Structure formats: structure tokens, C-alpha cells
Image (tube, rainbow, N blue to C red):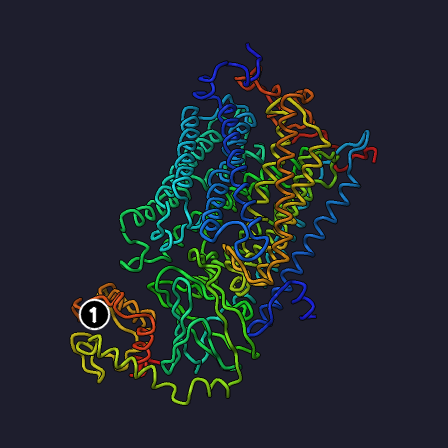
Amino acid sequence: MSTASFWREPRGLRSWLLTRDHKRIGVMFLGAVLVFLALGGVFALVLRLSLVQPGNALVDAHTYDKLFTHHGIVMVWLFMIPSIPSALGNFLVPLMIGARDVAFPRLNLASFWIFVAGAIVVLAALVAGGVDTGWTFYAPYSTTTPTATTLAAIGVFVTGVSSILTGLNFIATVHTMRIKGLGWRDMPLFVWSIYGTSIILVLATPVLGMALLLVATDHAYGLGLFDPATGGDPVLFEHLFWFYSHPAVYIMILPAMGVVSEVVSTFSHRRPAWYGAIVLATIGIALVGFLTWGHHMFVAGMSTFDVGMFGLLSMLVAIFSAIKVFTWTATMYGGSITIGTPILYVFTFIFLFVFGGMSGVAVATSSLDVHWHDTYFIVAHFHFIMVGGTLTAFLAALHYWFPKLTGKLYSETWAKLGCAAVSLGFILTFTPQFLLGNAGMPRRYATYPEPYQPLNVVSTAGACLLAAGMLLTLGYLIVAIFRGRPAGPNPWRSKSFEWRSPSPPPHQNFEEVPAWTDGPYDYDERGPDERGPA
Amino acid sequence: MNELLRHALYLPPQASSVSRGIDALHYTVIGAAFAVAFLAFLLIGIFLVRFRERPGQQPRAWQIPRWLEIGLASGTLAVFLVWWIVGFAQYRELRDVPDGAIRVHVVAKQWMWQFVYPNGANSETELRVPVGEPVELVLTSRDVIHSFYVPAFRLKQDVVPGRVTSMWFTASMPGEYPILCAEYCGAGHSRMRGRVIAVPPAEYARWIGSDTAPGLARAGEVLAARHGCLRCHTTDGTPHLGPTWRGLYRKQVVLANGQRVIADDAYLTESMMDPAIKLVAGYQPTMPSYLGVVSGPEIAAILEYIRSLGGAP
């Protein structure tokens, strides 16, 4: 049996482009999402620089509108949605359940190329005049603007097909490909989180596709479903859009939570505290998350009763997130904790998650939302919880599984420096935005009244630090790929299944069909009554 | 204390009857967020020191006792529910327009605000209101979605084309307060600004002139005649080609499809724009659409005229 790593065998460009190996598809997804992360980041940096002083310092209002739209579309659909599930999930899920591959390898490859096709259409829209609707595509602005709404909507629609196929594939894989003896109650929590995410991908994405196609038809042919001039209703679009886009927040954050559960457990060298509660919370978020979309529309003219009900359901979904924070903290209790870059990123994640989550509860409180709605407070809130959560968990995952992926170790010193820059940069960028929202600065503002300037300057300084941190991270990781020390199969001394094959794994994942007698969290723990050396 | 927190959180002045209550809830929720974060990181810090890896140390097989986890979860839920109850009670107060409020019609368009007062007076950009008296805004848009936002009042309402939305406020102190558009509406979004000028009631009365209510309604009557509304709608209670306007305002009407709706501003506006959608039972769909024919201020005047013909309270 060949033990050459999946990077080397089989050889040739063709063997990569047409591969059915989940690891290679994961790597290709990873490459793609990193490119889009950089692109979306450049858009964001231009936006921040332009906001350094009032009066359209760098770009005019129309260009600004396109840039924030491009930033949103690229970051949401081309980076965050596929970041952890399609890239890392693809690479890890089969390894974590002892499978050779996903259930439908060909479909997996199709999913990648459909994603690429969708991304190219989106990029074409950005080049062909750009889009100025905001990533939310609110009608009737989106249906009447002369910019490339139709093309952008079609591009996002196509990437949605990729999301659905990936989701289906994961569901089938988790149900049918688990190694003998690996029951639902023993599954790694990351796999559970990908499973929950996949349910949302399959159920919610079709609604987005439908809504976007309707917008495209309105825009291209004047169908007029959302245009009051022809008897349509713009608020209908808001309902359809948020029916997808609220659950989409959980598409981004559930895999992030899965990463955090794994990293906390590995670096504490003990089993997750109350595994059952984490699983329950994962599935709870996936399902209750479907019933909260109306909280995006508290000032849209919805009935008072609806506002009350959506507010109440939003409070329920927040509880599941709170349970997660309790269990992560409790997992560290009684552990044997080592410090490495992945868990440092997890601490940043928890910081952002607590403040992002609590500000989420705050904006779910209907009377408070009336002031904050569509202001920078909302921008800060969702950047903390959704973007910051996904980004820090993605970076934690990248650093945690980097040895698995490449077989190399990166420089811990540089990595800690990078983590500090990214974390401080992120917090410095978005904390002032909470205050700007309090002060009443609406979002999507190309320029602003004078008094808002000082906080905007601080925010832009933070964005520069964040960008520097990201560049540094890219730099030392590339160096590590070529010059890093060999990692060995299991540098973190984890018990999880993916570390039981060589790093990087061979084409067939495991050298021999694994026979696992212990679970992914069976650390060498002493029982509650034993007295160990304190 | 209120002033200290308000400044620390960069909140604007509290210039409406509801802003102090909303801010008090704001302080509570944000305070709790800091408390939770402090507690979580205190615990994480303690665990990091206490349970750091040392030679010969074994991790412990400790599980959170079920009572603790359930206690924490339900305690958190209880706190969230209290915020929900208080917040929703405040929200309902924001929605319920007090009796006798001064009605001002607001028309938004790219990229300006237009106000029509009860006596038919118009203004752009500046909304002049009396301090201490409730003011109801009846809002609609001529193009895309906008959002009427006065940070100092802690109030905001989306302004949707083809629909009428409403909000109300009582300015609590004299002054000028910025109006911003909070819903992205195109290249001029960030410059679509205006201001509320809150003045003492006596000054407002002088400004608006003594002849209030009949003004706008009278203008509406002239417009209704000019646009031909009165050829089919009577004002004396007798049905004609269309339902009579006498006593119609806010009355419940039965539609051709059996549904019942309240003939409020939103319904009446919709019926002018798209008469066939919610046809009243017993009438033919012969009315043409007045979309693009009557302007926002004209609609406001006609609505005011219909209101002056009586109806449900």
C-alpha cells in the first residue's frame, strides 16, 4: 500500500483538477476562499480609509456604495459560507469518522466547480460596472438600479447550488460512512456542527435562490413582484431574503462553534464538558434559527404582534449560544491545559462571541432595536459575532489543522504575534462602531456629519492593524509550508480520529482500516474519586 | 448617573418622551454584557493558571453537574425574558398613537424629506413641532425604501413605497435634532438629512397659523374634485359607482373576496394606487390607478378630506 501523502500521489495537474479525493477538493476550496478573503479584505480597507474623514475622502459616494456591496457579497457568499464547511469540513469530516471519502465524491467535485463558476459570474458582475444594492439586494432599489444586479444575483444563485450539494453530501456522509462502532453519541463535535450546518444549507439556500431569481427577473424583465409601481411588495422581498439570511448566520457560526469545541478539548486534554448539551444546542440553533428572521424587520412596518413573537424566538436561540459558552469554559476546568496559537484564537473567539452575542440579545429587545436598527451598532454586532466568530475560528482551525494538512509546524512565536495583531486589530476596528451606532450613525454612509469623525479614525486604525496581522499570518504560514519543521502525526496529542492517520494523510486516508476501540475524547483522565498528584 | 452613562456610550440627547426609558434598558443590557464577559474571562483566567499542564498531572474526568448547567441556562433565559417583556412593553408604547396627536404627512424621495401639515402647509427638510404635544407622522415613499430616523428621539420607521407606515413622538425639550435616512437608498443616502425643530407650543401655533384642521381637508376636497374622485364617490353617505366617503375612515369594510379590512391610511392609499387588489364587495373594478397621477402631498390632502367626513374613532 502506498503511503505517499495525498499532495504527491497521484501526480499531475489533471489529477488535481478532476480529483474525487475529498482532501484535494478541500484544499482547492481552501485556496479559493483565501483568495476571496483577501479580495473582500481589500474592499473593506478602501472603505475604512475613505471614512477617515467626512466628505468622501478617497472614493465618491457611488463608488463607495459599490465597494460595500462587493465587500458584503464576496465575504458572505465567497468566503464565510464556504470557509469552514466546504474547505475544512471537506478535508476533515471523512477523516474524523474513519471514512475513505465523502458519500458522493463526484458530486463533491461538481460542487467545487459549480462554486468556481458562480464565483466567476459574481466577479464578472463586479467588473461589468459593479453592483450598488448592498449585499441584501433590497427591492425596489435593487430592481431599479442600472448596475449589474441581475448578473450578481445569478452568480450568488449558482454558488447556492454548490452549497446545497455540499450540504447533501455531508448529510449522506455522516449517516452512511461512519466507521463501524462509531455511534451518533461518539461523533466528534466538529462533525455534529457540520451536520447541523448542512441541514440549514439544504433547507434555507433554495429560498435564497428563489428570492434572488425573482429579483433578477424583476430587474431584467420588469416582472414587478417587489415593485409597488406594478402592485408588488418590497417587504415581501425582505421576508424571503431574511428567511435565508438569518439561518445563514448559523451556517457561518455553527462550524465555527464546532472548531472551538475541538480546540478547547484538545488543548485542555480532556473530554468536552456535557457533550450532550453541545449537540442539543447545535441542533437547536439549526432548527430554531429558522424562526427568527423577522427580527431584521422590527421597523419595516410589521405588526406589533409579529415583532413580539420574533423577539421572543430570538431570545430562545440566544440561550443555545449561551450554553455553548458555559460548556467551553467548563471544559477547561480540571483539564491539563497547554497554550498554542489555536487556543489563543479561541479566546479571541469567546471574547467576540460574548460581546457579539449579548449585543445580539440587546438588538432582539424590540424597543432598543428601534434606535439601533440599520446603524453602525448593527454593523459592529454582526461583525463581532458572525464575521469575527467565523474569522477567528477559521484561523484557529487553520493553525490547529495546519500540521494535519501539510505535515509541517509553523513558528509559534510569529503565530502568536499574528494572533495578537489580528485580535487587537479586529476589536479596535469594531468596538468604536458600537459607539457610532449609539450616537446614531446609519450604516452604508459614504460620508457622515462631522461629530462622528474621531471614532471613525480609531476604527480605520484598527482595520490597518488587522490587515497587517493577516498579511503576517499569510507570510509565516507560507514559509512554514516550505521550511517548517516536520510535525509528526499528532503534534497536539489529540485523541480525535483525524490525528490517527499520518500527517499529511495518504490518498486513502488511513494506512490500514482503522479499528478504534476508544472515542475521540477518551483522554487519560483520572476518575472523580482518584487522588492524583495535584 | 444617567448623564454619565449617556456620555460614556456616546448617546445623543434624550429629546423625546420615550428616550429616557429606552436608555435605562440600554444601560441594563450593556451592563449585563460586561458583567458576563468579565465573569467568563475571570473563570478562564483562573482555569488557565490552576489547570495549566504540569508534569505528572492528569486531567480529571469531571462533568458539569446537570443541575448547574440547567440552572445556568434557565437563569440566563429568565434574564433574557425580563428584557423581552420590558422591551416589548416599550415597543407597544411606541406603536400606539395617543389621541389628539397632530398628524403630519411625510413623503420621502431620493434624497429629501417633505412634510405636509394639517393646514396644508408644506416644508422640505425641516419638521417643526411643538414641545410636549404628541405628533403622528404618516409616512410614504415615492421611489425606494427609506427610513425616517431621529437619533435624539430613539425612533426610526421605514418608509416604504406603495405602503403607508406611521410613528409618533412627543418632543420633550426645545432644540434642533438631526433627521437621518437609515435605509440605504442610493448615492445620496448619506446626505439625505433634515432636522426636527422643536419649539414651545405658543411659537408653533404662531408659525402654523390659527386656521388648522380645515386647511388640508379643504385642499383635499378641491383635489378630489379636480381628479374626478367625486364623480364616483359621494360624500353624503349614498353609494354610487364607488363606496361613499362619508363615515368611511377607519371603518371595517368587507372585500369582494370576503376578507375584512380597516379602511385606514394604508388601505385608502393602496386603493388609490391599485384599486383592484382589495375591491370592496358589491362594486365593479372600474376605478383606474392614480399611481403617478396624484403626488404624495396630494394623497395626504385627500386622506385628510376623507377623515374630515367622519368615520370610526
Front residue of this view, candidates A18 and B222: B222
Quadrant position of residue B185: bottom left
Residue B14 in the image: x percent, y percent?
A: 59, 72
In the picture, which quadrant includes the N terminus of chain A? top right
Q: Give the camera-side residue of A206 and B195.
A: B195
Q: Can residue A108 be seen in this view?
A: yes
Residue B270: image location, x then y, percent: 29, 67
User: Quarter of the image holding residue A193?
Assistant: top right
Name the residue that disc number 1 marks.
B281
Which residue occupies the extreme top position in the image? A1
Q: Is mark 1 on a helix, strand or loop?
A: loop
Q: Which percent across, then down, holds residue A432?
A: 63, 55
Rendered view: A16 above or below B124: above
User: Pointer 1 indicates a residue of which chain?
Assistant: B
Q: What residue type is labelled 1?
A: Ala
User: Is residue B29 toward the left or the right of residue A160 in the image?
Assistant: right
Disc 1 crowd rating (10 Å Cα; few below 14, some 14-19, many 20+) is some
Q: Is residue A518 above or below residue B6?
A: above
